[in-house]
Amino acid sequence: MENIRFLRSFIFLAKYLNFTMAAEHLYISQPALSKHIAELEEHLGVQLFIRSHHFVRLTPAGFTLYKESVPLLDKINEVFEKTRNSQIECWGKLKIGCVGFEYSFLPKISKHFMALFPHITLDISILPILMINNLLESQEIDIGFQPFMGNELKSKFKTRHIRKSRLVFLLQRKHPYANKYSLDLADLKDERFIIQAQSEFPQGFDWFIQQCNMRGFTPNIAICPSHVTTVFWYVAAGAGIAYFHFDPVYCQILRNDIAFVAMNGNDSYGNVAAYWKRDNPNPAISLFLKEFDRFNF
């Protein structure tokens, strides 16, 4: 274990090439870090760093050790985690409510989670947002994923921010603005809009109305579908313009029929957050949410 601790100290110093920063990230003192490096060098019989008052630099031997030790330490951490998890009573079910646009992260997270905890069943349902809220409250589901617009998240549930992306306008490929790089809402004041029904996504509906009013116009909302998939169908049919958060998966699926044009504005961001009830006793909730520490979405 001591060798692992020394190796970890080496990796942090090799990463930052600064004793102060490395020690801070390791939560140890600089003298302790220096001692770890000195003992590791003595054990290996090589010099790992060139040190001066002005810089810290890896030697060729140090570079080799850094390149080889990073994946090794990752593997050791994974083994330790699996060992700890084997002591947990990892049996049961985790019920998850989605709105249907979680392709960019949920399959990857679910795959890794099921490999770590094969005895926990994932029960994933696509549901309206208001139903997700009600089922979270009654603990009929354990975790919900929901979108929110802009930069501020308000909820009565515990939340974890998962993903932030630029908002885009969805236009039929033949629309005159389809080849634009970006547009402001004011550029579209005379257009027909397709917005998901307020009863299904109140925060998104109200946010859109507010953004239009701030630009001096009331939007012509032609259709208010209940499901986001129906929004795509209407746009592809030329019934109007919609907005959505940028998602590379959807862009790939819909690119033949729909153009994605960036929305201007400091508040023009779409977000996804995980929600859960604070007093829900299901231990699988924290295990599942911990998986998001592994990935950057």
Image (cartoon, grey):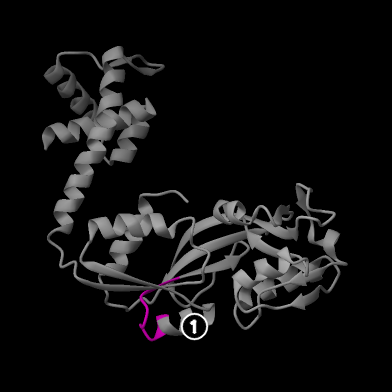
Across and down, in percent, residue 146 comes to 51, 70
Residues drawn in magenta: 136-144
User: Quarter of the image holding residue 241?
Assistant: bottom right
User: Dot 1 surroundings within 10 Å: few (below 14), some, or many (20 or more)?
Assistant: few
Is residue 139 one of those drawn in magenta? Answer: yes
Q: Nearer the viewer, residue 226 or 271?
A: 226
235 to 226, vertically: above or below: above
70 to 253, vertically: above or below: above
Q: Nearer the viewer, residue 58 or 184?
A: 184
Across and down, in percent, residue 227 comes to 60, 75
The reply to whether residue 30 is in sight is no
Q: Residue at x 59, y 51 (%)?
A: 252
Q: Residue at x 25, y 70 (%)?
A: 283
User: Quarter of the image holding residue 183?
Assistant: bottom right
The reply to whether residue 157 is in sight is yes
Is residue 3 one of those drawn in magenta? Answer: no
Q: Nearer the viewer, residue 158 or 250?
A: 250
262 vs 77, left or right, is right
173 vs 225, left or right, is right
219 to 151, vertically: above or below: below
What residue does disc 1 label?
Answer: 131
Quadrant for the N terminus in the image: top left
Judged from this view, the residue extending furthest toward the right is 190
Across and down, in percent, residue 28 comes to 25, 38
Q: Residue at x 21, y 30 (%)?
A: 7
Identify the amino acid type marked 1: Met
Q: Secondary structure at mark 1?
A: helix
Q: Nearer the viewer, residue 199 or 60?
A: 199
Across and down, in percent, residue 238 comes to 78, 66
User: Quarter of the image holding residue 77?
Assistant: top left
279 vs 149, left or right, is left
Q: Residue at x 83, y 74 (%)?
A: 218
